[in-house]
Amino acid sequence: MYITSWNLGHSSALDERPAELVPATTPAEVQLVWQKEKGMPDYNFGVNFREYRWMEDCFWHYSTTLSLEKRDGFVPVLTFEFLDYRYTIRANGDVLADSEGMFTPVKLNLEKYAGEDVLLEVIFHPIPKVPGMPEDRNQACMSVKPPCSYEWDWHPRLVPTGLSGDVTLEYRPLSHFTAAEYRYTLADDFSSVTVNAELTVSGAGDVTVELLDGDTVVAEAAICAPAAGTYNVPVTLANPKLWWCRGQGEPNRYTVRAAIGNGDISDTVTRAIGFRRVKLVMNEGAWRAIPPQTQGKYPITLELNGRKIFAKGSNVVSPAIFFSKITPE
């Protein structure tokens, strides 16, 4: 279930209540919500973006009420896709998360509140700025905020903050995956690959990891997880089909499927994965090259799966100022 209806207001301190709240439909950064509700001017036109500058230094409070069901064998789990940038999350006044960064989803177990109505608050702190830095993109140098947001020649000074991605509520089995990471090692001759699944589970259960080629299971491994924790499950596949970039071969991919079962209830996570070995290698005779010195031989080459290829690319800037407005199209 998507949580899209919120109230939004701002204050000058974390524990200060906003003087005013407006309705907010997410995903949407605070600037977009305030623009819609307050009739602020189009930030794309002229120097209208300057009218949004004050928003950088506020604490922004999103709030909503969740009615959580109590389901036997299941727990309510709340997932935030993107939180931009420094945030504090509270449920009925309890701090559930307090961190920064928008690139890792935040998952919260709300089992404690099952069967209750919960006041959920997501508070965004003022945008990060390094003290003493000039009022430009150097202010972002101690964070992973896009420096262009702090003003560039092609981007106005307009630094997004807020609920940039989806917020979802789902009921997961008591024993479920809270994290899943996959790393693999290819044999030197590409004759096999071993995938190491690092799985974090919330409770005991039988864990199975499968590698699928289409609908066919081509390799699998299983362990018994005696309790909540993180477990490593290696799976080895002989003669894997390799992933190749465009123009060099097929971009072959497999599916990794992990499952944990406890009685009749199970939880499953899947992910696509491609196997390849990428190296940056120096060309013979080019070791002493000093870029950008013009020379007949390039000093460094990209090697994919043992084959040297000519790598080319281009520079892509943000397709939109606000992340929530970027569509797949």
Image: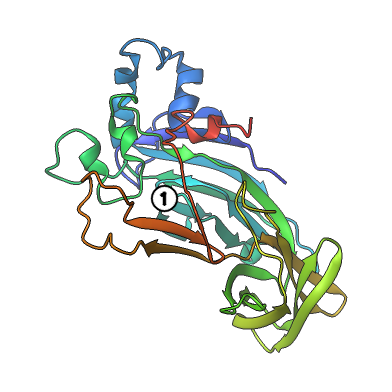
Is residue 73 at all visible to an observer of this figure? no
In percent of width and height, residue 223 lies at 72, 87
Q: Quadrant of residue 5?
A: top right
Q: Quadrant of residue 38?
A: top left
Residue for point 43% across, 13% down? 42
- Please determine whether, in this image, residue 148 is positioned above or below residue 116: above
Please give left or right for residue 319 compared with residue 15 in the image: right
- Please determine whether, in this image, residue 128 is positioned above or below residue 196: above
Residue for point 62% across, 56% down? 244
The residue closer to the viewer here, 172 or 293, is: 293
Q: Quadrant of residue 233?
A: bottom right
Residue for point 39% across, 64% down? 281
Amino acid type shown at disc 1: Tyr
- Please determine whether, in this image, residue 203 is positioned above or below residue 9: below
Mark 1, secondary structure of its residue: strand
Residue for point 29% across, 27% down? 54
The residue closer to the viewer here, 32 or 277, is: 277
In percent of width and height, residue 1 lies at 72, 46
Determine crowd level at label 1: few under 14, some 14-19, many 20+ residues with C-alpha closer than 10 A: many
Please give left or right for residue 266 compared with residue 191 in the image: right
Is residue 26 at all visible to an observer of this figure? yes
Please give left or right for residue 186 compared with residue 296 in the image: right
Instruction: Please tell me how many numbered marks the rendered image carries.
Output: 1
- Please determine whether, in this image, residue 208 is positioned above or below residue 41: below
The residue closer to the viewer here, 56 or 186, is: 186
The residue closer to the viewer here, 21 or 136, is: 136
In percent of width and height, residue 167 lies at 61, 46
Q: Which residue is mark 1?
A: 87
In percent of width and height, residue 9 lies at 44, 33
